[in-house]
Amino acid sequence: MEYSEKTKKLIERIKKVALRQEYVFDKEKIAELVEKSYKMFNLKVPQKIEWCVDITDKRFLEAAYVASAAWATGATRAAWAAWDASATNAALDTLAARVASATRAAWAARTALDTRAARVASAAWAAWAAWDTLAARVASAAWAARVASAAWAAWAASAASDYNWLEFLFAFEFLQTNKGNENDYKFIESQELFLQAKEAGIGYWAEKDGKLYIAPNPIISLNERLQFHSETKPAIRWENGLELFFLFGVRFEKDLWEKITKKKIKPLEILKIKNQEQKIIALKMYGWDNLLKELNYKVLDEKYLLINGEPLKHQVLEINQNGWIGRFLKYTDPADKAEGLLRVDHRIDETKSVEGARQWGFRPVMRLLGVDSLEFGREG
Amino acid sequence: MKTIKADRQGDLIFVKLDKLPKNLKPLKFNKEFTLAFGEKSGNAHILTKEKEETKINIYQDKDGRYYFQVEGGNAVVRHQGATATHREFVFSPGIYVQDIQVEFDELEEIRKVSD
């Protein structure tokens, strides 16, 4: 990889923070860095810092709501404003030439083609990528609204306080071999302060009435596909605080997560999981063969459907377990080839065939439109 | 026997219509619209414009189904999120209804699939 030794060291620092598995929350250091950050941009330093256990702290929630986006009035915003100003100038004068310069273009191309691939493959980037995804996910209004949890909403509000490591690294590397303007250096300086704050354990913050509410960074666990995942502990956890359980990127309530990971779940319980994604994960972890071995089932129909040019196995299974009858379409998802189960109405004949069972799942819209059957076009 | 063509993105189905039904509630479309959201996965099916000049009007019926009218360009439905897998669909100008797959449930008879 062709970047400077200094940038390599910076990446190592980010990597260390991202993958840190021990709890760090150095309040004294954080307070010092916060003060420096505010002063750097001539912002009024908060009179007091209130330390929160996690993002569910009521005080933090209130502050986050009021601020709507905590960063809007904070030092992060100021840092980005400086950077934006720099970018605006760029369009007008010297920076424009720089942006268009062969050096930058070449570096950008390498970043896109080579360095990025290598970075994505590294565990550090995996961690940050997943974290960024979470931030983006949490930041979406939909997430906040649907989850309808104050904690998540607060997280959404404060998610923007995490800054952009890629921009930081890009600017840092660029300035190793190029001369920047005043704003470039101010930006780098501010980002260095934020990185130090991250190293000291800061996670999320929100300001209200002259007080700064700070919650620590959670410790996260990922799998090789960069999904939140742990079979032994919460995949996102705050010390003595909120714990969130994930398997392959899907969130579970603790009880269900425990049953699945400790192999205490019964086959019938898996079939009755209402959330499709949770059910697919539970089926995957339990194992199809194990599940079917333990159930009294028969195959009513089996076909390979040609979807997007690929033959994908579909079956209709009927399970009769101590009088409980369930008829399921066992399908292969055309998008990721994962196998899933969809329960259909066992009281009618049309669901005995693969085609009928597939269509049954869309019965309400078929009724609405007054049609007898569906011809699937695009699927994916 | 009446058959109709439909596109399917995961649990979502899209059918092109000739006209909008009556008694729909207009909803606000602001750059993008979440058609469905996976509470546990955080993945979402997002309706958006392919180009800025495209106009999308969105409506909802009493059962919660969404309808969208696309004019002056294409609409795009993307599956976004950490575990998102479904492919992107482009919808040419026209009127579409979108619904969610249902699953049998003894208590509720049917219920919309949730992920």
Image (tube, coloured by chain):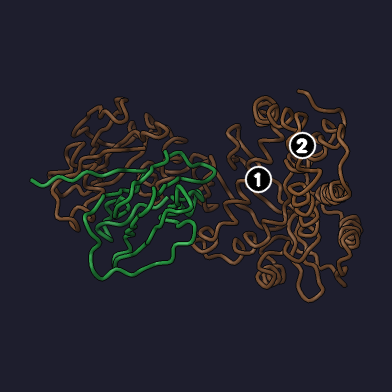
Q: Give the image location of residue A80, x and y in percent.
A: 76, 54
Q: Residue furthest bottom?
A: A209
Q: Give the image location of residue A228, x and y in percent.
A: 59, 42
Q: Nearer the viewer, residue A52 or B19?
A: B19
Quadrant of res A44: bottom right
Q: Nearer the viewer, residue A14 or B60?
A: B60
Q: Relative to A79, say whether A343 is above or below.
A: above
Q: Nearer the viewer, residue A152 or A119?
A: A119
Amino acid at circle 1: Trp
Disc 1, SS: helix
Residue at image location 76% in from the left, 33% down from the top: A101
Chain identifier of the brown chain:
A
Chain identifier of the green chain:
B
Residue to which mark 1 is pinned = A131
Q: Residue furthest left?
A: B1
Task: Tell me which numbered mark, 1 or 2, is placed earlier along the sequence.
Answer: 2
Q: Nearer the viewer, residue A94 or A320?
A: A94
Quadrant where the N terminus of chain B is found in the figure:
top left
Quadrant of res B25: bottom left
Q: Give the image location of residue A70, x and y in percent.
A: 71, 64
Q: Is residue B49 left or right of residue A37?
A: left
Residue at image location 68% in from the left, 64% down from the top: A69
Residue to which mark 2 is pinned = A15
Q: Chain of mark 2?
A: A
Instruction: Find the distance from the CA under tag 1 to the CA under tag 2.
Output: 12 Å
Q: Give the image location of residue A115, x and y in percent.
A: 70, 27
Amino acid at circle 2: Lys
